[in-house]
Amino acid sequence: MSIPINNLILDMDGVLWRGETPMPGLVDFFTTLDDAGIGFILATNNATKTAVMYSERLHRFGVTIPPEKILTSAEATATYLAGLYKPGSPVYVIGAKGLHDAVTDKGFRVISPAEVRAGGMAVSVVAGLSPQMTYEELAMGAHLINQGVPFVGSNPDLTYPTEIGPLPGSGAVLAFISAATGVEPTIIGKPGAILFLEAVNRLGGNMDTVAMVGDRLSTDIYGAKAAGLRAILVLSGISTREEAAAGLVQPDYIFSDITELASFLTRERSVVQL
């Protein structure tokens, strides 16, 4: 008999919502998890927002989830930097509020494009998605990297799901900088192991009982399998069933959305309790 799924690592964009629109059945999904006693951590490659901002969004959608249950690639990136550099070190950040706040919360000093243009240096260039980013921000980041400053990417997602379809994501920003410098970044988010291992740690550390739920084969599913976790693909975001069938790594389960997943988890718990 297989080990039951007692904990979930849940991606957000494309799984729980698209853009600013919650997925149908979102409130009922979390009610199902609570009723079944299934623990969870929300883990996202999106570094544009803070955990508090995600918690507030979920509250607007009718779901109460504390920031402690939300893990972003921005937090993982800042933790990575903290393992390499002293607090107070200058870091150049290309990204939105989530990435800026995570880096400053670890005690680093974020330097501006103007400071770089005036000759300022940094211990690292950290890049992610920001819808408001400017050419100057990108150019000064590339300038630092061309001088040998290490290049770190919050996540490699080329696109992110929205109500009108996929739009360019953090990976597209990293590709822009790489094209200008010839340097590939150190990637922190999925499919790297850092987010998965931190999420498992928050869930109690037993990988055998944890499954990753995501909508993207290249990050959520491949990364989960590489980390030794079970992987659940939902078809409400980026990847399709046909792409999954043709992939080198197969998810353990495929569901159309979180409503179908909730039904499966309810059935599984009923069988375990018999």
Image (cartoon, rainbow, N blue to C red):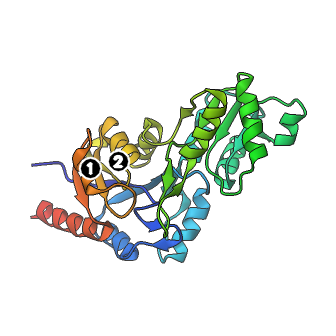
- The residue type indicated by label 1 comes to Ala
Q: Mark 2 = which residue?
A: 217
Front-most of 25 and 135? 135
The crowding category of the residue bearing disc 2, from other C-alpha atoms within 10 Å (few below 14, some 14 to 19, many at least 20), is many
In the image, residue 61 above or below residue 222: below
Residue furthest to the front in view is 179
Q: Mark 1 = which residue?
A: 244
Q: CA distance from mark 1 to mark 2?
A: 7 Å
Front-most of 134 and 21? 134
Residue at 50%, 52% (x, y): give it. Answer: 159
Residue at 82%, 41% (x, y): give it. Answer: 113
In the image, residue 183 above or below residue 264: above
Which disc number belongs to residue 269? none
Judged from the image, the secondary structure of the residue bearing numbered disc 1 is helix
The answer to whether residue 14 shows anywhere in this view is: yes
In the image, residue 203 above or below residue 197: below
Q: Quadrant of the image for the C terminus? A: bottom left
Judged from the image, the secondary structure of the residue bearing numbered disc 2 is helix
Front-most of 148 and 47? 148
Quarter occupied by residue 7: bottom left
Residue at 57%, 47% (x, y): give it. Answer: 170
- The residue type indicated by label 2 comes to Leu
Q: Is residue 242 left or right of residue 62?
A: left
The crowding category of the residue bearing disc 1, from other C-alpha atoms within 10 Å (few below 14, some 14 to 19, many at least 20), is some
Quarter occupied by residue 5: bottom left
In the rendered image, residue 41, in percent from the top left (x then y), is placed at: 43, 55
In the rendered image, residue 258, in percent from the top left (x then y), is placed at: 32, 67
For the residues labelled 1 and 2, say whether their Cβ atoms are less than 8 Å apart: yes
Mark 1 / mark 2, whichever is N-terminal: 2
In the image, residue 238 above or below residue 32: above
